[in-house]
Image (spheres, rainbow, N blue to C red):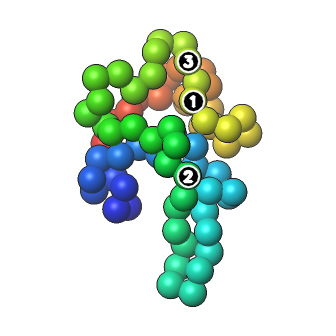
């Protein structure tokens, strides 16, 4: 939720990018993260993320990136 509060889109959320600690889960690996208001999140037709964890909406190109 904090990522969205500062308008950052992770783009590769999967179990391997979540660490479980005594104070709760922490999301790691922001290597392909992008700001919601970036001029170009991805090129048309390009899917970003790990296969198997990408939403069906992104795979078929119907996802709307609305914060």
In the rendered image, the residue lying farthest to the front is 31
Q: Earlier in the sequence, mark 1 or mark 2?
A: 2
Task: Quote the CA–CA distance across marks 1 and 2.
Answer: 14 Å
Q: Residue at x 47, y 12 (%)?
A: 44
Q: Residue at x 57, y 43 (%)?
A: 12
Is residue 2 placed above or below 6 in the rendered structure?
below
Q: Quadrant of the C terminus?
A: top left
Q: Is residue 13 left or right of residue 66?
A: right
Q: Residue at x 59, y 80 (%)?
A: 21
Identify the image quadrant of residue 56.
top right
Local SS, label 1: loop
Please state the horizontal and vertical placement of residue 54, each as a whole percent of the image: 63, 37
Label 3 crowd (10 A; few <14 / some 14-19 / many >=20)? few
Crowding at mark 1 (Cα within 10 Å: few <14, some 14-19, many 20+): some
Q: Indicate which disc, 3 or 2, sits on the residue closer to the N terminus.
A: 2
Up/down of 7 relative to 57, above or below: below
How far from the left and from the top, in percent, is residue 16? Answer: 69, 57
Kindly report which numbered mark, 1 or 2, lies closer to the viewer in this rendering: 2
Judge depth for marks 3 and 2 and give the one in front.
2
Residue placed furthest toward the top: 44
Q: How many marks?
A: 3
Percent coordinates x, y for residue 27 in the rendering: 52, 61
- Provide the residue designation for mark 3: 46
Which numbered dot is residue 29?
2
> Dots 1 and 2: beta carbons under 8 Å?
no
Residue annotated with mark 1: 48
Contact flag, marks 1 and 3 (Cβ < 8 Å):
yes
Seen from the viewer's position, the closer of residues 61 and 2 is 2
x and y percent of residue 34 in the render? 39, 37
Which quadrant would residue 40 be assigned to in this image?
A: top left
């Amino acid at each position: 939720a904090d990522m969205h509060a500062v308008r950052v889109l992770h783009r590769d959320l999967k179990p391997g990018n979540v660490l479980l600690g005594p104070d709760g889960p922490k999301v790691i690996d922001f290597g392909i993260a992008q700001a919601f208001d970036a001029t170009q999140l991805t090129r048309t037709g390009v899917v970003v993320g790990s296969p198997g964890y990408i939403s069906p909406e992104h795979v078929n190109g119907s996802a709307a990136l609305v914060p």
